[in-house]
Amino acid sequence: MSATSTPVGSITWQARRQESMLALTWRRFRKHKPAMVSALVLAIIIAACVFVPVLLGYDMYNAPVELRRQPPSAAHFFGTDELGRDLMMRIWVGGRISLLIGISAMLLSITIGTLVGSLAGYYGGWVDTVLMRFNDFMLAIPHLFILLIVAQLLRSMNMPEISGGPLPIIVIIGALSWMGVARLVRGQFLALKSKEFVDAARMAGAKNQRIIWRHILPNAASPIIVAATLRVANAIITESTLSFLGFGVQPPMPTWGNMLKNAQSQMTIAPWVAIFPGLFIFITVVAINYLGDGLRDALDPRHVK
Amino acid sequence: MTRYIIQRLLQAVPLLLAISIAVFLLMQAIPGGPMAAYENNPNISAEDLVRLREELGLNVPVPQQYLNWLTAVMRGDWGTSLVSRRPVLVEIGERLPNTLTLSLTAFVIALLLAIPIGIISATRQYSWFDHVMTTIAFMGHSIPVFWLGLVLIILFNVTIKNPVTGGPLLPGGGMYTIGENFSLGDRLVHLILPASVLILFNLSVHVRYTRAGMLDVLNQDYIRTAFAKGLRERTVILRHAVKNGILPLVTIIGLEIPNLFNGALLTETIFSWPGMGRLFFTSIERGDYAILMGVLMLSSSLIVLFGLITDVVYAFLNPRIRFE
């Protein structure tokens, strides 16, 4: 208590305060029960994606035909698909690809969104007008329609090494989903750029670039982290949608989306083929969204639920 | 107000022009472009190809092609489908009402459910009702639309049977029973599953925003004043709080309009619903670029238009915007 009133004490008080920023966030995060459970669920899913395929050791691509469409059993926990491949194996390998795409696409869309949003918010004027009109324009074309067309475009280009793999999908999703992030970051910059610490930095001779990246951006980190979490969830859904429609990752490489591609024709005879991959998308996305919720509560004390 | 509307209308014009340019360029970029459907056809000779290029106006520079296309579009000539050889506007015109039936039904039902749910959730925050509803909203937001469709088909078409006839409980696809005469009941039964998917999806978004908006408003001073005046809770909520509380919902509806089209594409594809989304999807697979351009232009224009309408509604509800 008295520490805050003496100059020397105030320094230690501040130092302790800064040190405990992470601890403070963690303490608030721990109180959010759904987020804690979700973190655990995600840890289990990630661990399973890494280890289960190694432990199971089924052949992911070839399987005896007589094993096709086996309902879930002790030998095949999630059953087998129309080619006799073990779904347990394919789900965890598919999970690797789906999570990889989700996280990479998030990184790309956060990078573009942060770049566009900071420049628009910081410079204002015509830069802001141009960038935000571009943002409006990107939002005015139905997302899925343009994703499908661009996916088709990339697919028809002659790029055998990457075509049908995860890379084009990451690029498409990342490049077409940064608009919300840009708006968010722009809002943060508009609010922060008139603060005293920015004036102070400018007085000290800091250049625009330094003020943007070293002074303002770190202060806008919390909402960006939350947005990033939610973008992973969205990217996983988008990937599964594209792959389900046949415009994403191509078989035989499994993802949670393309495992559902043939499921519709199997629904009457082998409903488990349609249920399990989707269930894992659902569980993962719910968990990530709750994680984002918990992070929001933990990082932003002003945010009252 | 009129000035505000005119101002927003004028802003929409360059946006629409930019969209038209982008759509046009995208179609140019697709390999083979407009001619792809013919070039692979062994029955069409080289001379025919030249003649076709001329006929389609492809022998002039690209900017000129764009201007020609744009003027034609303005005149209502949206080209001809490369597959069915029927005018694009006719093809779309046949499908649009089906899409609107499905999407708007779902949208309106979701809204009618979401506003009361959101209001009750906010006024009874942390009650069991609130917990159940926020959880459902959270789940609905995280479920892949297409998978929900598949699960509903498995449940209500494959697994659960109609106790009287022994057939499926609900139809799993199509807009009506083939071979039967038109009946409203038949149409409605076919609407249930695809509409449910869209309702849950819309509902989850709308409940979250109504609840959040109401919670913000309920903590404000003027609400306390209204209570202090001795007004009944009903009056305070319905007369004072709701108008401000649903402002975030209005904004989000404007932003969610594009999602109506995305949702339509998925549900229509899964439930074989003969709408615009499914038309778009099959046209991509067939490379029918004339239809693709038409659907893209129309849906983008509708998005801009609905965005405009939500802005105007927002300004009507929130006078601070109007007079800025």
Image (tube, coloured by chain):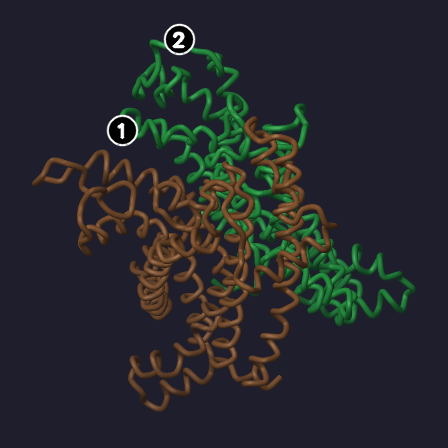
- Look at mark 1 in the image and give the residue it sits on: A268
Secondary element at tag 1: loop
Q: Residue at x 21, y 34 (%)?
A: B159
Chain for colour green: A
Q: Please name the amino acid that badge 1 sits on.
A: Thr
Q: Is residue B99 shown above or below A281?
A: below
Q: Is residue B251 shown above or below B141?
A: below
**Quarter the N terminus of chain A occupies:** bottom right
Name the residue at the right extreme.
A205
Residue B171: give x, y in percent of width and height: 23, 42
Quarter of image, res B124: bottom left
Q: Residue at x 43, y 72 (%)?
A: B246
Q: Please name the amino acid that badge 2 sits on.
A: Pro
Q: Residues within 10 Å of mark 2 (few under 14, many from 20)?
A: few
Residue B190: give x, y in percent of width and height: 25, 48
- On residue A214, the disc is none
Residue B250: give x, y in percent of width and height: 46, 70
Q: Colour of chain B?
A: brown
Residue A146 visible in the snapshot = yes
Q: Chain of mark 1?
A: A
Q: Chain of mark 2?
A: A
Residue A165: give x, y in percent of width and height: 60, 28
- On residue A64, the disc is 2
